[in-house]
Image (cartoon, rainbow, N blue to C red):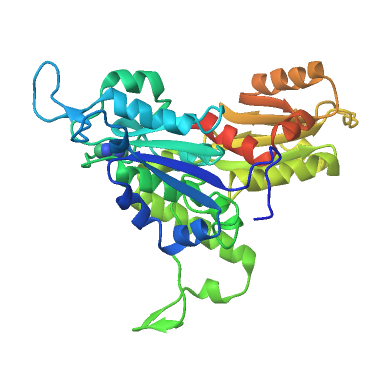
Amino acid sequence: MSEQRESGRPAGMDFYVLTLFPDMIRQALEVSILGRASRKGLIRVQTVNIRDFSEDRHMRVDDYPYGGGAGMVMEAEPVCRAIESVEQRSQKRRRVIYLTPQGRVLNQTIVEELAKEEELVLLCGHYEGIDERVLEEKVTDYISIGDYVLTGGELGALVLIDAVSRFVPGVLSNEESAQFESLQDNLLEYPHYTRPEVWRGKAVPEVLLSGDHRKIEAWRHEKSLERTGERRPDLLEKSFRTVGCWYGGERARSPAEELTRWVSRYGSLMDYDRRKLQKQCRVMEKQELLLLAVDLEAEWPKEGNPFRNLRGRETPLALLTLRGSRDSREKLGRFLTEQGFRLLLSRDLTEQQKAGGMDLLALEIRKKIL
Ligand code: ADE
């Protein structure tokens, strides 16, 4: 593999799955897209059999629960040793995720957050659970894949590996496709069609044959909204219309556009260099999200602040500035807060770019408005 991280580590992602059933993990990862990604070395999944760390001559790893009750409990020591066998590989801090119905329910934002890690340790329990003491010592995250109880954590680990791997560059044939898919905007995907054009009397929606990409995007957005309203109205409440906006010419325009693309598939853009826009009164809604990039050293219009007619109704705002002092950034932040915006974050773009670029920033913003 040619691609290397800056740290000198190979690109891709390492998963360590601690389980009593390593075959269950291995077999599932031999096929399809994840099989291909493993063969290419883009994802590296290593299983660690917890039973190998048993201290018992019958290789037992479970025992009766103190206080009585049904079922068995996995002992702390073999689990701890299994985790330590991974820790010994290097000094780095890794997230240790325990798959359990008692965890945070996995969603796309958590998936994207986990995809930023280089390595993940996934701990799969069985029986009634794992001795609490080792969980307290070693586990950093508790994750559930849904509000139902499975016989063990393996299926949860597989779900997590699958969802996270889609964000590893090269795993999907088109790198972009993970970024822009369903749920990014808290909306369900629009319907898809392929040939034949008419199937059993049902025709493909005409707009898709028009070749007019703007119309097609608009139609898809509408269908996404419609479908989410019908099938997952709970998501609709969490969805935002993203508006990318800039002042200060090209320098501000391109980061505003790029960030908007990272945050939302369906974002729209406003160019506040345009006098006409500055003069118009615009009130943004609570369910909108304003991504604003401003060159603080660009000349202000003679009428004053270019955003003087822009108002919010608790509208979330990410303020990104170029050049200019921290003082002037904070002043603009205060001004917009007084205009009704809810400042999610305020950053100098060059510092932000050094900290990791637009993808991380987009993720941070999405986590903040959840
Ligand atoms: N183990 C048992 N049930 C689970 C669930 N719902 N999610 C993750 N791990 C589990």
The answer to whether residue 200 is visible is yes
Percent of width and height locating residue 138: 40, 23
**Residue lying at 21% horizontally and 29% vertically, measured from the top left:** 56
Percent of width and height locating residue 84: 42, 28
Can you name the residue that lies furthest to the left here?
69
Q: Is residue 137 left or right of residue 325?
A: left
Percent of width and height locating residue 229: 38, 49
Q: Is residue 82 left or right of residue 186?
A: left
Above or below 196: residue 161: above
Percent of width and height locating residue 38: 49, 56
Taking depth in this image into account, of 101 and 319 the one nearest to the observer is 101
Taking depth in this image into account, of 101 and 82 the one nearest to the observer is 82
Above or below 282: residue 32: below
Can you name the residue that lies furthest to the front here?
57
Quarter of the image where ligand 1 sits: top left
The answer to whether residue 147 is visible is no
Q: How many marks?
A: 0
Q: In this view, does 290 lie to the left or right of 199?
A: right
**Residue lying at 78% horizontally and 45% vertically, measured from the top left:** 254
Taking depth in this image into account, of 340 and 159 the one nearest to the observer is 159
Quadrant of image for the N terminus: bottom right
Taking depth in this image into account, of 194 and 302 the one nearest to the observer is 194
Quadrant of residue 282 within the rendered picture: top right
**Residue lying at 79% horizontally and 18% vertically, measured from the top left:** 326
